[in-house]
């Protein structure tokens, strides 16, 4: 199993999968992500994401009536993660990314948001983000493979 290499400071952007793996204790990725949260709690890094992450993580718990899981996601995202609003500028960048990379709308919003705040690293499990030129992406499944 590989190890997640994190910057010593700055901001790290997380995709929705990171929040899901963390909150739901995914057996493959939970341990891999613990250094990320440790660095956050130590005040060494900032974790950021788009506000769209809140919508994405809440769909299944709301559909299943799992209010405890809804509360867990809200606690993590609303108190530990800096959520960046979806602005018109981000939507324009998202449209450009969709047109040039074939990312789906939520993914294009995530990529445009990360680019707009100049994050040091983008952690995901979606290889489609590799299509964004010059993007500092880390694919979790590839880290595990090492």
Image (cartoon, rainbow, N blue to C red):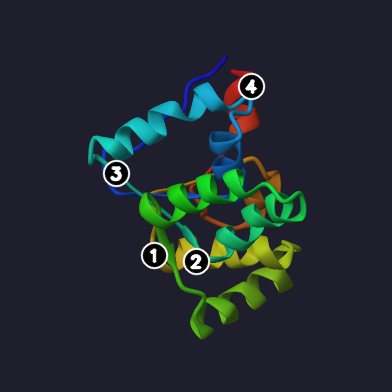
Q: Which is more foreground, mark 4 or mark 1?
A: 4
Res. 45 mark: 3
Q: Is residue 93 left or right of residue 99?
A: left
Q: Residue furthest left?
A: 43
Whichever of labels 1 and 3 marks the residue nearer the N terminus, that label is 3
Res. 113 mark: 2
Q: Residue 24 appears in which quarter of the rendering?
A: top right
**Could you tell me which residue is drawn at 58 percent across and 79 percent down?**
91
* Numbered disc 4: secondary structure: loop
Q: Are marks 3 and 4 in contact (CB under 8 Å)?
A: no
Q: Is residue 36 above or below residue 119?
A: above
- Quadrant where the N terminus lies? top right
**Could you tell me which residue is drawn at 67 percent across and 46 percent down?**
66
Q: Residues within 10 Å of mark 4 (few under 14, many from 20)?
A: few
Q: Position of residue 104 (x, y in %)?
A: 74, 63
Mark 4–mark 1 distance (CA, rounded to whole Å): 31 Å
Mark 1–mark 3 distance (CA, rounded to whole Å): 14 Å
Q: Nearer the viewer, residue 145 or 63?
A: 63
Mark 3–mark 2 distance (CA, rounded to whole Å): 18 Å
Q: Position of residue 128 (x, y in %)?
A: 70, 50
Q: Which is more foreground, mark 3 or mark 4?
A: 4
Q: Is residue 146 above or below residue 105?
A: above
Whichever of labels 4 and 1 marks the residue nearer the N terminus, that label is 4
């Amino acid at each position: 199993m590989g190890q997640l290499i994190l910057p010593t400071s700055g901001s790290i952007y997380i995709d929705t999968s990171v929040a899901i793996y963390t909150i739901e204790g995914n057996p493959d990725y939970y341990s891999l992500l613990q250094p990320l949260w440790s660095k956050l709690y130590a005040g060494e890094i900032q974790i950021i994401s788009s506000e769209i992450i809140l919508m994405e993580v809440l769909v299944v718990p709301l559909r299943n009536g799992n209010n405890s899981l809804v509360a867990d996601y809200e606690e993590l995202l609303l108190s530990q993660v800096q959520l960046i609003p979806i602005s018109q500028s981000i939507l324009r960048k998202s449209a450009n990314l969709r047109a040039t990379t074939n990312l789906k709308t939520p993914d294009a919003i995530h990529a445009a948001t990360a680019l707009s705040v100049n994050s040091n690293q983008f952690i995901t499990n979606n290889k489609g983000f590799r299509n964004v030129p010059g993007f500092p992406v880390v694919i979790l499944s590839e880290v595990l493979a090492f």
